[in-house]
Image: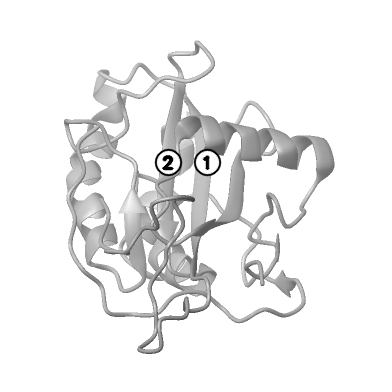
Amino acid sequence: MAHRRRVLDRSAGPQPGHALQARTSDAAGWPRFVWHNATTMSSDDGLPASTSDGGSPSPQRWHLAQYNIAWLIHPLDSAEMADFHAALDPINRLAEETPGFVWRHQNPDGNSTGTRIRGDDRILINFSVWEDADALWRYAFKSAHAEVYRRRREWFVHDEEPYAVLWWIAAGHEPTVEEAEERLGHLAAHGPTPHAFTFKQRFPPPT
């Protein structure tokens, strides 16, 4: 899997508190969302291990992962999907330039349309990491991405519920599709919990 990296200076994540009610009830967004964050990794546990001047570990930093899936209405290479294909690169660039963006899943061609899950060629994935829920919300619903999102029903349906999930990850951790599928399955089985939740009912990062 190809990834590009660059450094961010921004600190991450909302402060611990009670579960929050989102300003929107839908966590999905298209297209896919490359590490922008450089983190010192410990050699034994794989978690960020930056230290203060006194040598003590600094508080754990957390980022928000989002994963959603949708089922194609038309074949991916059909004329009906032309506008979706045309939007992929510009919207991906927009995501990468958005404050609070951390990472997006992509294949060597620069997007995730070639990734297959569950043995179903109709399913496309949308998988990214953000500094916090507000950054994701601003990109998904308050940027040019929103116009593409409004057209989603021309291209996709949701054959199953839930189709989108959020969860906290340690800063510097690169989540896998298998991890994302487990979180989505947990949400389906147990509803929103700190392990897997939604935009409508989300939880603070671990303390």
Q: Which residue is located at x 19 percent, y 36 percent?
A: 2
Quadrant of residue 142 in the image?
Answer: bottom left
Q: Crowdedness of circle 2 by 10 Å Cα count: few (<14), some, many (20+)?
A: many
Q: Earlier in the sequence, mark 1 or mark 2?
A: 1
Quadrant of the snapshot with the C terminus: bottom right
**Residue 140 location (% of width, % of height):** 43, 61
Q: Is residue 157 left or right of residue 49?
A: right
Q: Is residue 117 above or below residue 55?
A: above
CA gap between label 1 and label 2 equals 5 Å
Quadrant of the snapshot with the N terminus: top left
What residue type is disc 1 on?
A: Asn
**Residue 110 location (% of width, % of height):** 19, 38
Q: Is residue 101 above or below residue 153?
A: below
Query: Total marks drawn?
Result: 2
**Residue 90 location (% of width, % of height):** 18, 52
Does the residue at mark 1 contact the one at mark 2 (Cβ under 8 Å)? yes
Q: Which residue is mark 2?
A: 126
Q: Which residue is mark 1?
A: 68
Q: Which residue is located at x 31 percent, y 21 percent?
A: 76
